[in-house]
Each structure stands twice: as structure tokens, then as C-alpha cells.
């Protein structure tokens, strides 16, 4: 079959109402898939950023812990060397300040970890939604090839499941 004949045959098939309906359905599903995929990538990026923020806070917490430990060593050395009460008190207050800072920083790190987990759960839900939408496109393609409306309906049900899954992403707490 020549290229012209093949193109003419495809053009004739494209004029069939069933094929047009399925093609429109495929285009809509593909557009929804693109939107869901972008949203999923955004949430995955936010998840990674939250993880980085949490890691930074944990490192900062460790630095404060080291400073607290150094202050405690300095305080103990001054006590053993009979240093002035002023100096001992200075390092004691530093030690308490670093302990409080350490606890506050750990609390913030835990908040970032919760945010990371939340964004990760939302991203996973969007990835599942992508799968349903992709399956919908596959079934729509099969509907065009098989000319069976049941396969087309299955593609729409799969796409609907994907849209519902994506729409409920915001409900994850």
C-alpha cells in the first residue's frame, strides 16, 4: 500500500464518529495527565526541599550540642582550676542557652519532617492518579483499534478514577 493510500485510509477512519469521540476523550485524558504529572513533580520537589530543610536543622542542632558540650567542659575546667564564679556562671548560662536552642531547633526539624511526609504522601497519590490516567489512554487506544465501546467506557472509568484520586490529594492530612 502506498503512502497516499494509507493516509487516505486513515483520513476515512478519522471521519468515523466513534473514532472522533474516542480521540477527543484521549486528548482530554492526556491534558489531565499532563496537569497531574506537573503537580506531582511540584510536590516531589517540595518534599525534597522539606527534607533538606530538616537535614539542615538537624545539623544545626548538632552544632549547638557541640557548643553546649564545649561550654560544659570549660565550666568544669574552671571549677576544677578554681576559676572565678563569674566565668563559671558565664559558661553555665551558655550551656543552658545552647540546650534550649538545641531543643527549639529539633522541634523545627521535626516540623520539616512532618511537612516532608505530607508532601510525599500527596506526591504518591498524584503518581497513582497518573497511572490511572495512563491506563485510560491505553484503553482509549485499544477502543479505536477494536471499535468496541465497552473498551472506551473502561478507558473513561480509569480516567475518572485518576481524576478522583488527584482531586482528593488535598484531603490527605
Image (tube, rainbow, N blue to C red):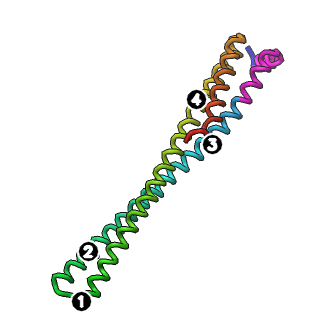
Q: Which quadrant of the view contains residue 146? A: top right
- Write down the region rendered in magenta: 3-28
- Quadrant position of the C terminus in the picture: top right
The residue wearing badge 4 is 131
Farthest-out residue, left: 80
- The verdict on residue 79 being magenta is no
Query: If you read the primary sequence from the N terminus, does the residue marked by circle 4 or circle 2 appear first?
Result: 2
Nearest-to-viewer mark from 1 and 2: 1
Q: Residues within 10 Å of mark 3 (few under 14, many from 20)?
A: some
Q: Which mark is residue 72?
A: 2
The residue wearing badge 1 is 84
Residue 55 location (% of width, % of height): 42, 57
Nearest-to-viewer mark from 3 and 1: 1
Q: Is residue 14 left or right of residue 39?
A: right
Residue at mark 3 to residue at mark 4: CA–CA distance: 14 Å
Residue at mark 1 to residue at mark 2: CA–CA distance: 15 Å
Residue at mark 4 to residue at mark 2: CA–CA distance: 56 Å
Residue at mark 3 to residue at mark 1: CA–CA distance: 62 Å
The residue under the point 71% across, 34% down is: 31
Amino acid at each position: 500500500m502506498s503512502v497516499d493510500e494509507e493516509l487516505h485510509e486513515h483520513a476515512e477512519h478519522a471521519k468515523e464518529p466513534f473514532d472522533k469521540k474516542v480521540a477527543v476523550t484521549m486528548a482530554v485524558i492526556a491534558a489531565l495527565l499532563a496537569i497531574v504529572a506537573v503537580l506531582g513533580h511540584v510536590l516531589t520537589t517540595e518534599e525534597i526541599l522539606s527534607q533538606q530543610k530538616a537535614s539542615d536543622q538537624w545539623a544545626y542542632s548538632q552544632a549547638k550540642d557541640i557548643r553546649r558540650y564545649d561550654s560544659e567542659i570549660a565550666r568544669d575546667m574552671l571549677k576544677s582550676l578554681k576559676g572565678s564564679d563569674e566565668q563559671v556562671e558565664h559558661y553555665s548560662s551558655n550551656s543552658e542557652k545552647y540546650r534550649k536552642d538545641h531543643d527549639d531547633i529539633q522541634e523545627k526539624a521535626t516540623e520539616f519532617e512532618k511537612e516532608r511526609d505530607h508532601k510525599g504522601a500527596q506526591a504518591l497519590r498524584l503518581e497513582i492518579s497518573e497511572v490511572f490516567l495512563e491506563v485510560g489512554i491505553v484503553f482509549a487506544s485499544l477502543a479505536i483499534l477494536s471499535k468496541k465501546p465497552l473498551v472506551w467506557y473502561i478507558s473513561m472509568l480509569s480516567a475518572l478514577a485518576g481524576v478522583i484520586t488527584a482531586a482528593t490529594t488535598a484531603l490527605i492530612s
